[in-house]
Amino acid sequence: MSGLTEAGCRARRARLWAVLPDDVEWVLVADPRHVQYLANFWVQPLSFSGGERGLLLLERGGKATILADNFTVRSAVHEPFVDREVVETWYDHTHSVSNRDYVLFLALQSIASELVGRTGLVESEWLPVAALGVMPYKECGLDRSEGDEVDLGEVLRELRRQKEPDEIELLKVCMRAGDAGQARLREVVRPGVSEFEIYREVQRAALEAAGRSGLVYGDFRATNGSKIKVGGLPTDYVLQEGDLFILDYSIVLDGYRSDFTNTLAVGTPSEAVKDLFGYCQAGMAAGEKTLRAGVNCRDVHAAVAGAYPENGKTANFTHHAGHGIGLAHPEPPILVRESEDVLLAGDVITLEPGAYVDGVGGMRIEHNYLITDEGYERLSNHLISLT
């Protein structure tokens, strides 16, 4: 259960420094996803510190520092790949506690003298770094136009698109776990079983395949001709003959996630339902033919959507054709009609065709893909089939 690798974290830091202006000497990273991305520091969300954060200070030349309170450090899933940890006590079982954001401020205050007079970038505006005598980049008085100011968070979000090998390996673990849950669904879906019962079985199979704790979320819902588009966590609804069951879900490990879908018929599917499923399959096949680095995402969407009228039937395809996946859901690139995104080698994306027709039902299917210069590698391997 190693998470990201030191080599991968150092490669991502090097990529960050390569795109920042030369006069930036340090950066303070505050988004927990980016702290994980650059240092393998991820707070266990199923813990008393769930939702808390550490800060990551990176200095040009390679030095990396984690700043956090003592309980947040204890809740980290892995040892971070940093040179030092600056830990302030938040709770000591003796004294009252203070605001944990303020404790982070105290941790930063303890090393502020190292940064004064040096140009830096701060990712988050919530931290009052100016009170330490440390000036963020856009307040440093450098001779730059407003358009040249650097948004550290935006830079990191763009860099995140092109996955390093350790990220891809972690995503593959998520995919294998997701595949196991999809396989278990096929074994348990039937009239008389509730959405919540299915959720428990899928979650158990997925986490057993992952071999570790993780988060399971998504759509575990039955649909039919009168409610063609539903989603969310399971209810106590009991599946009926003629329903469809959509499992569109994610397994999250160290912040990275899968996201893929199948729709199963509850009982024997009607011919109209089979037609809808055929539209989805045709859309996925058409989309796959377009996948490679350099392709405009709107063209992928056009290919997926274009497969529906080619089947000579009326169908409603009302959402995106897919999206990026990784440390967020969804994240760029977005495969929609007016997308300005272009596929990059290293993107991990979904293709997600759906069909929704009143009186018949609603469904969608989905696979995950790693984009390459030559095409793609499909990362999810669950069976896509109505029965």
Image (cartoon, helix red, strand yellow):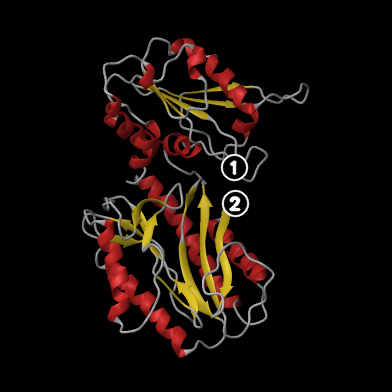
For this rendering, which residue is in front, 34 or 138?
138
Image x and y of residue 331, in percent: 40, 50
The amino acid type of the residue labelled 2 equals: Ser
Image x and y of residue 233, in percent: 61, 62
Q: Is residue 25 visible?
A: yes
- Circle 1 SS class: loop
What residue lies at 43% left-to-right and 29% top-to-bottom?
A: 123
What residue is shown with label 1? Answer: 44
Assess disc 2: are there few (<14), some (14-19) or many (≥20) residues with their C-alpha within 10 Å of its C-alpha: some
Assess disc 1: are there few (<14), some (14-19) or many (≥20) residues with their C-alpha within 10 Å of its C-alpha: many
- Circle 2 SS class: loop
Vertical order, 228 against 56 (above or below): below
Vertical order, 340 against 159 (above or below): below
What residue lies at 43% left-to-right and 14% top-to-bottom?
A: 115
The disc label shown at residue 5, or none = none
The amino acid type of the residue labelled 1 equals: Gln
Q: Locate residue 118: give its quadrant.
A: top left
Vertical order, 124 against 359 (above or below): above
Image side of residue 7 versus residue 30, left or right: left
Image side of residue 381 versus residue 41, left or right: left
Q: Residue furthest right?
A: 94
Q: Earlier in the sequence, mark 1 or mark 2?
A: 1
Image x and y of residue 251, in percent: 52, 56
Image x and y of residue 265, in percent: 52, 81
The disc label shown at residue 213, or none = 2
What residue lies at 26% left-to-right and 52% top-to-bottom?
A: 342
Image side of residue 232 versus residue 305, left or right: right
Dots 1 and 2: beta carbons under 8 Å?
yes
For this rendering, which residue is in front, 345 or 140?
140
Vertical order, 302 against 165 (above or below): below
Which is more foreground, mark 1 or mark 2? 1
